[in-house]
Amino acid sequence: MMNEDQVKEIIQRWRNTQEDDLKPEDYQQFKTLGSACLSEGESQQLLKFIQDEKNQVIVKSMGCVILAPLLNEVVKKAKDLDQYQAAITHLTRTCRPNELLDSMLEIIEGIDPGAISETILALLPHLQSVLLQLDEGKAACVGSTLSALQKQLSRLPVPYTEQQEEADEYGLCRCSAALTPFTEPFVEEVKRTDGNCAATAEDEELKIELLKFCMRSLREPLLEAELKHDRKSPLWLFAVEIMVTLSALKEPLPGLLFFSSLRKNILMDNNQFKEARACLAYLLFVQLITIDNFPAVFSHVFILQCNMEYISQLLSSKKESHLLKGLALFTKSLERVQDNSLPVSLLDLKSFYSVPQARQAANLRRVLTDCPIQHLRESGLQVFQVFINKLDAEAKHKFFRCMLKTSNHAGIESYIIKNIRNQFEFSMKQGNANDWFLGTEFISLMRLVLRLPQGAETDLLGSMDKVMESLNLLRYVLIRDEELRTNEDVWEELCRTKEEYLKMLRVCISISRAYYSSELKALREDQKLKAKEARDAARSTKLVKSITVKQEKVSNMSPEVQHQVLQSALVTFDLMESLIVRIEEITEEKLNKLN
């Protein structure tokens, strides 16, 4: 440790030394002395030294090196907080802006993971002061600063529930709120430029950097957050500010969403950029933030078509926040489209062909069948039906065919068959007749409906929903057969398809009933002969190994549940057989009337 005289001697030497002659050891020594003052509680003495007129050359040359120690004290909320803040403020006014910025970016880069929000909140006001002092290269510096800040903030968990946002345990909400006033002067600078003469290259670069900041913010944290207009949470307010900033930057929203050439200027991969635009579409069309700035010249069908890309992106995620936004955006995009109006030509466009018929259908189907969150499944089913309602007859026919061929899920197929019945009934009404659900094309659908995927070996328990709905549709069609009988070829093909299906289904029911009856009998005998412990041990390898119900192996169920499932299967086979009998009765009654 140096004594007071040695310190004075060093300071005097610094005063007498030209800046170019200062050595790295001098900078390190200056930092050591400053840190020693702070650790010994001599903040007043350090502030006095920094503000002393005689030391301004020293401070200007080497002051940046004590910025980090001073900021650490501010983050720790030491008792002499005002003095530390005063010292930092003096450094930002005295040291060279470029050197200060380098020191601040170094602090951000090496930030303590446990003090991310505290450090950023303490640094932001001083960082803004430094950036505003810059002239040449300001845009690039603003960009690198915002990027560094967002990189660190992305490490913080995004609060999702209202309680989490209110607690703001990790400070993300506070930091997001602080970024708005931080960027405000730079946004104002771009606005002033736009209102006057032609923008310079530096002006354009600043605008691009601010746009990058907005797009990154849309992706993170806003895409991850639950945003509701009836709950003015900190992240909701941040979302509003981001949308307002985009408008202030005079960046046309249609350009960003539908015709974006911004991608080449933003250092985000294609997936990240698409996620940012998906969040933008959600905020605009669902939450209606700055919707007044969106031109009314675009048709609802065009907007739906363009939004399909973002809907698919959101529904392909497994995150609840993404799925909620995807379903809400899909719903809002469909709402203003007239029922029965979407033509089949739209399904053939790339955005529709790859989305509703393949990727979109697969993503929505995954939500309906695999999502563990009930309200998302329910919302998904509502959206699925709304989408069907918007298609015209030909498009519905094409979509139903695609679903029946590719869904591989009895529940989805049964829902499609219900819709086929609805369309058949609608087409029977006066003025609604069409070939897609009454003529030759209807038969191509019925072939897909009246089909057992594995023939006689089809698992009827797993296919129960589809089989029951198929039989109900067939029964209804036979009752309302007047229109179909007018076309002899159509009627004969339907009857032939019906006979083949019922014949195969009877065989399948017979095989399945025999199998499940034997398994039920074996289960009952096993329950009588074995103690519970032995029965539980044997259950994992012995009984009903090949049966699957709702993705759960029967062999993994308790004996009581196995008994219920097997008994239910036999009852279901009886119901199927009774429907077959009724269909045959209807057929015979119709023939008798004709004869």
Image: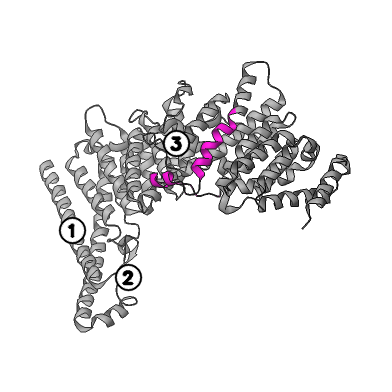
Q: How was this image coloured?
A: one colour
In depth, the one of 594 and 10 nearer the eye is: 10
Q: Which mark is residue 577?
A: 1
Query: Which image quarter: residue 523?
Result: bottom left
Contact? badges 3 and 1 (CB < 8 Å): no
Tell me if mark 1 has few (under 14), some (14-19) or many (20+) residues whose alpha carbon lies within 10 angstroms of its own.
Answer: some
What mark, if any, has residue 556 been given in the picture?
Answer: 2
Establish if 456 lies above or below 183: below
Marks 1 and 2, how far apart in space? 29 Å
Q: Amino acid at mark 3?
A: Trp
Expressed as whole percent of the image width and height from the top left, the position of residue 441 reads 34, 39
- Neighbour tally class for label 3: few under 14, some 14-19, many 20 plus, Cα within 10 Å: many
Instruction: Measure the C-alpha gap from mark 3 to mark 1.
Output: 57 Å
Which residues make up the magenta segment?
Answer: 155-184
For marks 1 and 2, the one nearer the N-term is 2
**Looking at the image, is mark 3 or mark 1 earlier in the sequence?**
3
Q: Which mark is residue 236?
A: 3
Q: Is residue 179 left or right of residue 513?
A: right
Mark 1, mark 2: which one is toward the viewer?
Answer: 2
